[in-house]
Image (spheres, helix red, strand yellow):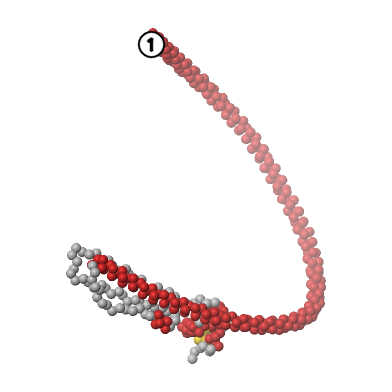
Amino acid sequence: MALFNEWQAQRQQRQQELLNRQQQVSEDLALWRENRVNMGREVRQSLSDCHQEIRVQTQDFLSNCRDRRYQDSQVLMQSLDEFVNALAAETSQFLRDAAEARSTMAIAQTKSLQDFHHDLNLCVRQFCQECRDRRLDMKAELTEYLHQFIEQLSADVADYLDELDFQQQQVAQELQETFRADRQQRSQTMQGLYNHFANLRLHRQQEIVTLQEEMWRNVKEYRLNLFNQVWGYIPAPTTPKTSPPSSAAIASAPVTPVASAAPPTAAPPKVVTPTAAPPTPAPPAPAPPAAVTPQPSPTQTSQTPDAMMQQAVYDYLKQVKSARIKDIEAQFKITRIQTVDILRALITKGLVTQNNRDYMIVSK
């Protein structure tokens, strides 16, 4: 309890000290505020007096400067007038002297130019005569040299042309032999490829027929089982069976190149949901559709025999009346060598003729 009383006493003492300090601070602030106001009043008064004094001094200085500038301008104007008069007199005297000197110089220059022109005419006539004589002498020498050079050049060109003709004949003979060997090899290769393609096509058709038979057999069993599960077991009515084409019939069919042949896709049977009271007579099971044999596409591939390509080119020329080699290449997507071989064969047979770079059929 004594400790609390002591703490209370100290607390009251601290509060009293705080109040004393606050009062002292308030008095100090009021005193400083009053001093600041007095000081500001004195400073403003001193600034006003200084400003008035500076204004008076500035006006005096400006008036003195104005008077001094006016006096200086009067002196400068007088000196400029004197300078202009002197310059005009000197300029007129200089122009008179220059005119006299120019006339004198013109007379002397005219005399010197006349003398130079006379001497130059003599020199030019003499130089032209010398050049004419030298040109005549050089013309005779060059004419003789040119005749000799033309004779030598004609002999060299004739020998070179004979050599080129011989080389061209040799190269043409070698190219003909090379083209003939390449054409024979290409024909053999094409025939082998077509035989291989025919065998592949026959084998594929046989596989398609086998897959169709197996597919329809599985479909029949699936539909029968599904029908029995839904409606119960009912003997299926006898329906005529459509037999798929035999492999012998496919083998006897003509072989034609096929671009693409896809087997028909069989749609899965629709599942019928049974109602609460099924009908008494059971509906007969629908007969499966007949097997469809894939028909070969009439589109021909780019690899065709020579006879078929010749016929195609002949029909194209008959249709367009006239065409160039690049048009035939773009139409049939073949190389330049194949096009030239086909056109040469048609020209040999007398079916096509050539006019410049255009090829057209022979009119009968």
Q: Quadrant of residue 283?
A: bottom left
Measuring 18% from the left and 68% from the top, which residue is drawn there? 279
Camera-nearest residue between 93 and 342: 342
Camera-nearest residue between 341 and 105: 341
10 Å crowding of disc 1: few (<14), some (14-19), many (20+): few
> Residue 355 placed where, x, y %?
55, 85
> Residue 82 placed where, x, y %?
68, 40
Mark count: 1
Residue at the outermost top position = 2
> Residue 56 placed where, x, y %?
54, 24
The answer to whether 8 appears left or right of 38 in the picture is: left
Please say whether residue 222 is visible from this viewpoint.
yes
Please say whether residue 327 is visible from this viewpoint.
no
Residue kind at label 1, given as amino acid type? Phe
> Residue 338 placed where, x, y %?
55, 80
Measuring 62% from the left and 83% from the top, which residue is drawn there? 177
Measuring 44% from the left and 78% from the top, which residue is drawn there? 202
The answer to whether 335 appears left or right of 144 in the picture is: left
Q: Quadrant of residue 1?
A: top left
Residue at the outermost bottom position = 364
The answer to whether 148 appears left or right of 172 in the picture is: right
Camera-nearest residue between 15 and 6: 6
Measuring 51% from the left and 78% from the top, which residue is drawn there? 193
| Element carrying mark 1 | helix
Camera-nearest residue between 252 and 160: 252
* Residue for badge 1: 4
Taking 83 as reference, is 118 above or below it? Answer: below
